[in-house]
Image: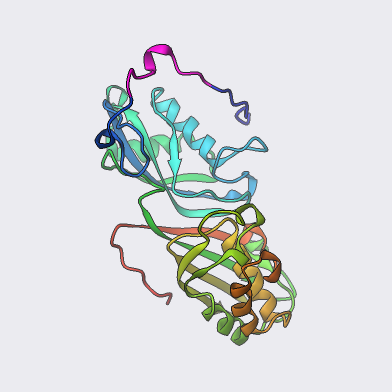
Amino acid sequence: MAPKLIRTMRTPAADSIPESLPSKEELHPATGRLPRPGYYRFKMVIAFDGSRYAGWQFQLSGLAVQQCVEEALKKLFPGSLGVHGCSRTDAGVHALALVAHADVPKKEFRIPPRKLTLALNAHLPEDIRIQQVSRCPQDFHAQYHSTGKEYRYQVWNHAGMNPLLQNRAWHVPRKLDLKAMRRAAKFLEGRQDFRSFACVHDQWVDNTVRTIHCCRIRRSGRHLTFIIRGDGFLYKMCRSMVGTLVQVGLGRFTPEAVQSMLLEKNRESAGMSAPAHGLTLWKVRYGNEKTRRAD
């Protein structure tokens, strides 16, 4: 039976409200929250097939991956304080290595760390798997400490769809001009304003400037893989980039038009958003990890 989606507002008990505000030195530098004594913090690397989920983050409209992971964690550690992911993902989007953290009470932690991955997976559906669990510093934050992400988008470019990629790739039956698409992709690299490629939901955010370290297209027969690495992404930005590049390949836009789209800073000037099911969060980068170019 699917978990219930009812969420309730909780009012803090009177004895949980501090008599005075904490000093600046007591607050976590990234989140502005108080540290949690008596808890271990764990970093998790999570893979999932997003086909039947409403995304990573809790949703009123359907079952979310975050909800499933939190419920699995609660079965092992009833006092755990929730799971915080590095990024939101849309409904239907997949992940190979989404990073999250969670706080577990020390007094409840009786499982050998090497067995924690198996224990969590035993309580998860088969389309969600914990790849790795490790203790991390108490001040580690999966979202705020991330320095970059890599997404990959798959396209099957042939009249007949590959049934093995039915839920993993966008089927584009018409022949694509790969040379034009690669030329257009070069305009998307570098630090610039990506307002034209942000969902309308993000049009009014304060800062829409992002750095794309790599936007490349790899071809293997009829199978195209778009590899996009950057320091951060706006809502549906990757899908808008891929959709626009595919439309360049179909002759709807010239490669140079992509440069004009960036300058216009208007979502209506850019191309379509690619379907969600072709997108996978491939890797999350932390600290001083070097940014590699695609092979």
Q: Position of residue 140 (x, y in %)?
A: 31, 44
Residue found 44% across the figure and 27% down from its top: 74
* x, y percent for residue 293: 40, 75
Q: 61 left or right of 72? A: right
- The stretch of residues the image draws in magenta is 10-20
- Quadrant placement of the N terminus: top right
Is residue 107 placed above or below 42 in the rendered structure? above
In the rendered image, residue 188 lying in the magenta stretch gets the answer no
Most foreground residue, 227 or 11: 11
Magenta: main secondary structure equals: loop
Q: Is residue 54 above or below residue 172?
A: above
Protein image colouring: rainbow
Q: Is residue 167 visible?
A: no
Is residue 219 toward the left or the right of residue 34 in the image?
Answer: right
At 54% from the left edge and 39% from the top edge, which residue is drawn?
125
For residue 264, which quarter of the picture?
Answer: bottom right
The location of residue 91, given as percent across then percent down, is 63, 49
Residue 28 point in image, percent of width and height:
31, 39
11 within the magenta span:
yes
